[in-house]
Amino acid sequence: MKSIDLGQDIAGLVLITDFVTEEEENELIHHVNQQQWSGLGVSPNPELKRRTQQYGHLFSYRYRKVLQEYGPLPSFVTPIVDRIMSNQLMPASPNHLLVNEYNEGQGIMPHIDAPALFGPAILSLSLLSPCIMKFTQPETGHQVDIVLPRRSMVVLTGDARYKYKHGISKDLEETATDGTVIQRAQRISFTFRQIIAWEVPSDGCGFLSCDIKQWESRHSRSRRLCYRRRHRRSRSKTRKENVGHGKLKD
Ligand SMILES: O=C(O)CCC(=O)C(=O)O
Ligand SMILES: [Fe+2]
């Protein structure tokens, strides 16, 4: 395990290589493969364009809120959670684990994990294959590409958590800043978060992934109206219509 402080690139960004062993990686993959996946038309998040699993709590991408508490995180991640806490990577134990699967051609749009719902540290463990996580600062356009090696843990706090969007491209091949070429293959990530609220307060911006500017302007009149309009629109559709005809989300 080696901790690399990437604070020179983005304040609050840390990468820890070899966070898990190959044996642990196999175990983690084995366990999730025994469980039900959601996404690609399957509830509880059918609109997602990739397969996911959630533990601890159920977050709904459609409603942009937490719908259910499942209970504690499963025992197969206990050693990982203990390592997170003994290295003081999170202020409180994670109560949400999101497993994302990315096959070739799948990625995730640039976003900021909802500041109102998730705590100040977002941790993501990369399994099976590496990828580039692209960080972009919407106001300045500053962009940093970080290679997430297989079995590494990336830690987002501070600016990396709140001021930069993070995303993963759908490209089949990526080139790192140093020229290294990465062939994308199946990647399964474990994102550990702390849920701090089940939904955005009624005067909030209502975005799952909003940049900090949108977040800061949440009290503005236009934002409030926009939020109400969005909600009225989504309420007026039945669940069946949304699932059957709704656009699949990244
Ligand atoms: O796959 C990852 O490492 C990141 C996932 C992510 O950013 C998210 O689900 O919010
Ligand atoms: Fe994210």
Image (tube, rainbow, N blue to C red):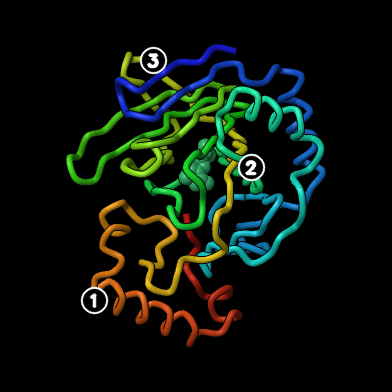
User: Local crowd at mark 3 within 10 Å, few (<14), some, or many (≥20)?
Assistant: few
> Can you tell which quarter of the image residue 22 is in?
top right
Give, as a three-letter code, the residue at label 2.
Answer: Pro
Per the rendering, the mark at residue 213 is none
The location of residue 21, given as percent across then percent down, is: 70, 17
Q: Which residue is mark 3?
A: 180
Give, as a three-letter code, the residue at label 1.
Answer: Arg
Per the rendering, the mark at residue 221 is 1
Work out how far the residue at label 1 is from the one at label 2, CA to CA, in angstroms: 34 Å
The location of residue 90, given as percent across then percent down, is: 56, 35
Quadrant the N terminus occupies: top right
For marks 1 and 2 on the same chain, the one whose residue lies earlier in the sequence: 2
Most foreground residue, 102 or 134: 134
> Can you tell which quarter of the image residue 158 is in?
top left
From the image, state whether disc 1 or disc 3 is nearer to you. 1
User: Local crowd at mark 1 within 10 Å, few (<14), some, or many (≥20)?
Assistant: few
User: Local crowd at mark 2 within 10 Å, few (<14), some, or many (≥20)?
Assistant: many
Circles 2 and 3 in contact, beta carbons < 8 Å: no
Residue drawn 40% across and 28% down?
A: 13
For marks 2 and 3 on the same chain, the one whose residue lies earlier in the sequence: 2
- Which SS class for mark 1? helix
Query: Is residue 217 visible in the rendered structure shown here?
Result: yes
Give, as a three-letter code, the residue at label 3.
Answer: Thr
The location of residue 32, given as percent across then percent down, is: 75, 41
> Can you tell which quarter of the image residue 65 is in?
bottom right
Work out how far the residue at label 1 is from the one at label 3, CA to CA, in angstroms: 47 Å
- Which SS class for mark 2? loop
Q: Which residue is mark 2?
A: 94
> Which residue is outermost to the bottom?
236
Query: Is residue 105 visible in the rendered structure shown here?
Result: no
- Which SS class for mark 3? loop
